[in-house]
C-alpha cells in the first residue's frame, strides 16, 4: 500500500506532460469592441486552454511599428 505522498508524487510524474502549456496556441477572433474614446479591443478564444484573451489596439498600421530595412547591391 502506498502512502498519500508516494501516490501524489507518482501522479505528478505521470501527468507532468499534461500540466505543461501547449507549444502552439491558435487564437480565433470572436469580436471587436469600439469604445467611446476611440480605442478598440479584440476578443480572441483559445481552444487548447479554454480561455478568452483580450488585446487592445488603436490601428493596424504595420509600417509605423516595424522599420523596413533592405540591402541594395
Image: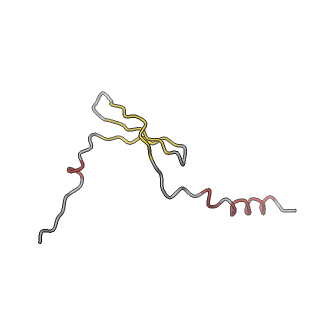
How many marks can you see? 0
Q: Please give the name of the residue rendered at 35% of the width and 40% of the height, measured from the top-left corner.
A: 56
If the image is split into quadrants, where does the C terminus sit?
Answer: bottom left
| Extreme-left residue of the structure | 73
Q: Is residue 68 toward the left or the right of residue 54 in the image?
A: left
Q: Residue 16 placed where, x, y %?
A: 64, 61
| Extreme-front residue of the structure | 73
Above-or-below relation of 16 to 39: below
Q: Which quarter of the picture shows residue 58?
A: top left
Q: Which quarter of the picture shows residue 67?
A: bottom left
Q: Residue 7 placed where, x, y %?
A: 78, 60
If the image is split into quadrants, where does the N terminus sit?
Answer: bottom right
Q: Is residue 32 toward the left or the right of residue 37 in the image?
A: right
Above-or-below relation of 24 to 70: above
Q: Is residue 13 toward the left or the right of residue 59 in the image?
A: right
Q: Which quarter of the picture shows residue 40?
A: top left
Task: Give the image's coloring scheme.
Answer: secondary structure
Q: Please give the name of the residue rendered at 47% of the width and 52% of the height, measured from the top-left corner.
A: 25
| Extreme-top residue of the structure | 36
Q: Residue 61 placed where, x, y %?
A: 23, 45
Q: Residue 33 placed where, x, y %?
A: 36, 32
| Extreme-right residue of the structure | 1
Amino acid at each position: 500500500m502506498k502512502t498519500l505522498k508516494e501516490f501524489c508524487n507518482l501522479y505528478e510524474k505521470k501527468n507532468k506532460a499534461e500540466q505543461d502549456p501547449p507549444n502552439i496556441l491558435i487564437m480565433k477572433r470572436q469580436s471587436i469592441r469600439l469604445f467611446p474614446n476611440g480605442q478598440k479591443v479584440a476578443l480572441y478564444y483559445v481552444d487548447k486552454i479554454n480561455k478568452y484573451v483580450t488585446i487592445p489596439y488603436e490601428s493596424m498600421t504595420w509600417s509605423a511599428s516595424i522599420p523596413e530595412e533592405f540591402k541594395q547591391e
